Amino acid sequence: MPLDTTSYAIPVARSVADLRAVVATWRKEGLSVALVPTMGALHAGHLSLVDLGLTRADRVIVSIFVNPSQFAPHEDLDAYPRTEQADAEKLTGKAHLIFAPNAAEMYPAGFSTTVSLTGVTEPLEGEFRPTHFAGVATVVTKLMLQAMPDIALFGEKDWQQLQVITRMTADLNIPVEIVGGPIMREDDGLAMSSRNVYLTSAERQVAGKLNIILRDAAARVSSGTPIEEAMSDARKRILSEGFSSIDYLEIRHAATLAPFEAGHPDGPARILVATKLGRTRLIDNMPLA
Ligand code: PAF
C-alpha cells in the first residue's frame, strides 16, 4: 500500500510498512518523533496534544484508529464518529503524518495477543468496562512498537487510561516517554470529548454543570470535609441537575487510583466521575488542590 499523498494535504500512511518507512527517513535525518494516538473525530483537546508534541519533538504523527477491541459489544463502536477528511484538514500544517490503518492491518487473521494489567486497570472504569483497558493497552503497545516514537501523548481527560499506559510502558520497558496533556474545556467547563456530539441541545445545557459540581466537591475535600460526605452530596447534586445515572464519583490516589482509607487524602489525589446523560456517557476528573 503506497503512502497516500493525494487524498489530503497531509500524507497518510495506511500500513505499518509505510509508517516505518517515513519514520526511518526522519531518523536518518536525526529528527525526533512524537506520536499522538487518537480515534479521530478530532477536537481542540487532540490538537493541543499535537501542539505539545511539536514543542517536544521535530515530527508529530497522529494515529487515527477506532479500536474495536476497546469497545464492549453493547458499546458505541458503530456509532463512534468517523470524520477522516475533517481530521486531516485540522492536522494540515500542524502534524507531519497521519497513520490510519484499517482493522485488518492492526488485527490480521490469527491475531492472538492481549496486553493486560492488574491493579490500576481494576477500579472505576475497570468495574464498568471490564474489557476496555486490555483493548487500550494492546492497541497502544502496538502503535508504539509500530511507530517507535520518542514520546507519546495522551489527554488527561482519560486520566485512568493515562495511568494505565504509564504503568504498562514502564512495566514492559517500552522506550517511549509518556506525556499527559491538560484537559481542554468548552466555555462552560464541559471537558472536550469526541462523544459530546451525541448530546442533544437540552442535554448540552446540563452537561457543563458536571465540571462545576466536581470542582466544588474537590474544594470541599481539600478544605477538610470527609471524602464520603462530599461525594454523597455531590452525587445527589449530579442527579438533581438531570444526569440519568452515576457509574462512579470518587476521590482516589492520583497514580494508583487506590481509595484513601482514612477518609481524607493523604497523598496526591484526583476526583474522577463517570455519569450518563441520556445515551451519552461523560467522564471527567481534576486534581485536588
Ligand atoms: O484515548 C483514545 O482515544 C484511545 O483510547 C486511544 C488511546 C487512541 C487508544 O485507542
Image (cartoon, rainbow, N blue to C red):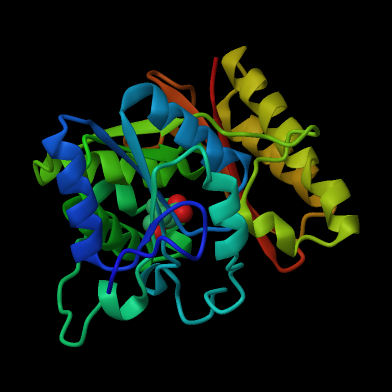
User: Within the image, what quadrant is residue 115 found in?
Assistant: bottom left
Report the side of 253 relative to 173 (left or right): right
State which quarter of the image contains the C terminus: top right
Residue farthest along the left direction in this orientation = 173
Find residue 135 and report its horizontal and vertical position in percent.
32, 65
User: Which quadrant contains ligand 1?
Assistant: bottom left
Which residue is found at the position 25% from the left and 57% from the top?
19
Report the side of 173 relative to 147 (left or right): left
Find residue 282 and report its horizontal and vertical position in percent.
64, 53
State which quarter of the image contains the N terminus: bottom left
Residue farthest along the bottom direction in this orientation = 109
Which residue is found at the position 65% from the left and 40% from the top?
191
- Residue 48 visible here: yes
Q: Nearer the viewer, residue 61 or 26?
A: 26
Find residue 142 and report its horizontal and vertical position in percent.
22, 59
Query: In the rendered image of this protein, does residue 56 appear above or below residue 208?
Result: above
Report the side of 270 relative to 31 (left or right): right
Query: In the rendered image of this protein, does residue 122 appear above or below residue 48?
Result: below
Residue farthest along the right direction in this orientation = 202
- Residue 117 visible here: no
Q: Nearer the viewer, residue 70 or 285?
A: 70
Which residue is found at the position 65% from the left and 19% from the top?
219
Which residue is found at the position 51% from the left and 53% from the top?
9
Find residue 225 and report its horizontal and vertical position in percent.
62, 20
